[in-house]
Amino acid sequence: MKKQKTEGNREYKSDLFSMLMQEKKYALETYNAINNSNHKDPEAIEIITLEHGVSLSIRNDASFILDMSANYYEHQSTYSPNMPLRNLLYYTEDVRRWIRKEEKNIYGRSTISVPTPHFVVFYNGKQKRPEQEIQRLSEAFIKPSEKPELELTCRVININPGNNVNIMQRSSALAGYSYLIELVRKYEPDMVLEEAIRRAIDECIAEDILAEFLRAHRNEVEKIMNLDFTHERQLELTARDEYNAGIQQGIEQERKHTDEQRLRAEAAEARIKILEEALATK
């Protein structure tokens, strides 16, 4: 797969979630888990890759077609309300490229059939979020509409430990991914990041959690997780700096406001004193 430029000017082949979803068996079990379905044949999955015309320009994106449904999955460790808008761009770009590739005539008299899209975000950030929630494109409209003429809904599923237990039990990919991330977060404060990642992977293999996958892709997984956690840490530091800067700005504005009030009060007192002195001399 080609390298893709990502947020924060990062470039890398993929990320761990995307790697897992490139495995048809993991994509299928995840689909079954969140849709309460029971598809059996992993080969029924058609992984949509960059070479097939799908834009994967934003990290953590994975997409595939099953039963004429186009499924867009993304993992996020930082909650974003903009996923409906981003998914709209994904889907319209995919359809545009498909129409051009298949030489379809959008001005013709025959209806052009396209795969039915479904959009899901798997969230495992540190911010507390509901087990599941729905994001809507219409929530971003500058002028709200009770009956929006364009809508896109995105299902956000919390995969942090203790959430959506039924889904996690049916998807070894989601459960294993969540467990691995939690182990790294557990060990990272007390050791170098690279060591925390290696220890977490060792434990998962020893406990037979994504063991086959981790053995086969260990070097790449270590590199990718190092990038991901470094990027996540950068986002946390940036958010903290912005928060502290906002507090400092508020303090400075309050101090300025207080100084202005004090100067006005002193000026008023001075005027009263001058007036009193003028009246006393009469």
Image (tube, grey):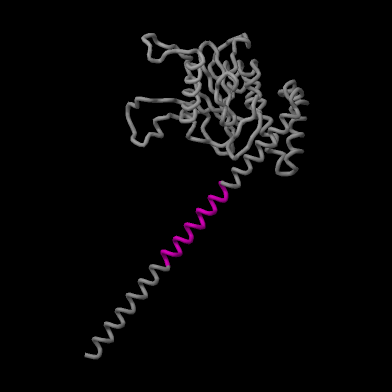
- Left or right placement of residue 163 versus residue 23 in this view: left
Question: Toward the viewer: 170 or 236?
Answer: 236
Residue 44 percent location from the top left of the image = 59, 10
- Left or right placement of residue 165 versus residue 207 in this view: left
Q: Is residue 281 magenta?
A: no
Question: Toward the viewer: 101 or 253?
Answer: 101
Occupied quadrant, residue 204: top right
Total labels drawn: 0
Occupied quadrant, residue 149: top left
- Left or right placement of residue 197 versus residue 81 in this view: right
For the point 64% across and 34% down, the residue is 11
Residue 223 percent location from the top left of the image = 72, 33
With respect to residue 75, does 280 lie above or below?
below
The furthest residue to the bottom: 281
> Can residue 79 be seen from the camera position used here?
yes
Question: Toward the viewer: 108 or 276?
Answer: 108
For the point 35% across and 71% down, the residue is 264
Q: Does the magenta stretch include residue 247?
A: yes
With respect to residue 150, does 127 lie above or below?
below
For the point 69% across and 30% down, the residue is 180
Residue 63 percent location from the top left of the image = 56, 21
For the point 57% across and 15% down, the residue is 32
Q: Quadrant of the C terminus?
A: bottom left
Occupied quadrant, residue 53: top right
Q: Quadrant of the N terminus?
A: top right
Examine the residues drawn in magenta and state their main secondary structure: helix
The furthest residue to the left: 282
Residue 201 percent location from the top left of the image = 74, 30
> Can residue 163 be seen from the camera position used here?
no
Which span of residues is magenta-colored? 239-258
